[in-house]
Amino acid sequence: MPYDAHLLELMREALKKCPGISERKMFGGVCWMLNGNMLCGAEVGRFMFRVGKDLEREALSRSGAVPMDITGRPMRGIIWVEAAAALDAGLESWIRFASQFVGSLPPK
């Protein structure tokens, strides 16, 4: 997952005050973990959020959101959000939304 250094810094800043967050290199890029579970990431021009299957439809109804598909088959419960749309809505808003699912998972 190639990444944009500027988007990484924006995500780091948005996650600064969130407890339980760690950063990990994954998929050739950077992802952030909540209590050891993948929460979000940044790529060139877009962000990735793990929202879970139950919240996927609601997430996809938001501006700039599309299913994550890097293999020709959508990955259920994980979405891409166009950077401009995510920034307009506020990264903190997307982080809170994804944290509903990821925060319910047992810590790793």
Image (spheres, rainbow, N blue to C red):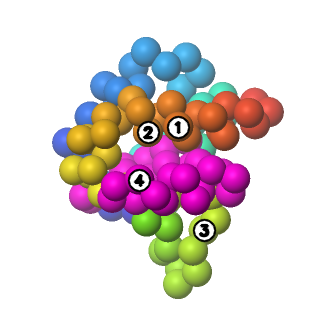
User: Closer to the camera: disc 4 or disc 2?
Assistant: 4
**Residue designated by label 4:** 62
Q: Residue at x 40, y 59 (%)?
A: 65
**Residue designated by label 3:** 75
Q: CA distance from mark 2 to mark 1?
A: 5 Å
Give SS at disc 1.
helix
Dot 4 crowding, Cα within 10 Å, few <14, some 14–19, many 20+: few
What residue span does the magenta drawing correspond to?
A: 39-65
Give SS at disc 3.
strand
| Type of the residue with mark 3 | Met
Which image quadrant: the C terminus? top right
User: Closer to the camera: disc 3 or disc 4?
Assistant: 4
Which one is earlier in the sequence, the residue at label 3 or at label 1? 3
Which one is earlier in the sequence, the residue at label 4 or at label 2? 4
Q: CA distance from mark 4 to mark 2?
A: 10 Å
Q: CA distance from mark 3 to mark 1?
A: 18 Å
**Residue designated by label 2:** 94
